[in-house]
Amino acid sequence: MGCNVKFLKEVKIKKDRTILELAKDCKLKIKAPCKGKGKCGKCIVKVLNGKVSKASKAEKKILSEEKIKKGYRLACEARIKDNVTIILKD
Ligand code: FES
């Protein structure tokens, strides 16, 4: 029987980078078929806490208001503004 494991890794970064850029720097994989252009909607992550940029037009087009309120964001659009905790999907 399998089980799930979560690893948490903390990194220091310069603010105002996108989650996708940061993930690439950290060698973490996030699906991004549109190469970060905010069109495919495959780079969804969940911001658990902390401060990121307001939802962009692209995010509002792809994600429902309810999902955005729950912390779901496009990694290629959301920019890190302060300490954050982010969950990446498989
Ligand atoms: S990489 Fe396609 S929407 Fe973010």
Image (tube, rainbow, N blue to C red):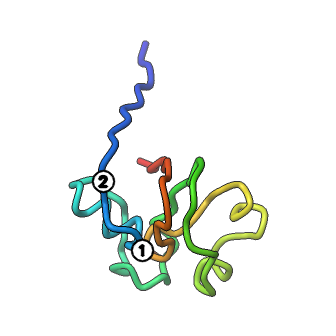
Which numbered circle lies on residue 72?
none
Which corner quadrant of the figure contains ligand 1?
Answer: bottom left
Total numbered labels: 2
Give the residue drawn at x 39%, y 69%.
Answer: 15
Give the residue drawn at x 49%, y 83%.
Answer: 39
The CA distance from mark 1 to mark 2 is 12 Å
Give the residue drawn at x 41%, y 47%.
Answer: 90
- Residue 17: % across, % down: 37, 72
- Residue 83: % across, % down: 48, 53
Label 1 CB less than 8 angstroms from ligand 1: no
Give the residue drawn at x 69%, y 64%.
Answer: 68
Is disc 2 surrounded by few (<14), some (14 to 19) or many (20+) residues within 10 Å? few
Query: Element type at marker 2?
Result: loop
Q: Tag 2: residue type?
A: Lys
Is disc 1 surrounded by few (<14), some (14 to 19) or many (20+) residues within 10 Å? few
Q: Which residue is mark 2?
A: 12
Query: Element type at marker 1?
Result: loop
Q: Which residue is mark 1?
A: 16
- Residue 40: % across, % down: 48, 77
Viewer-side residue, 62 vs 10: 10
Q: Tag 1: residue type?
A: Asp
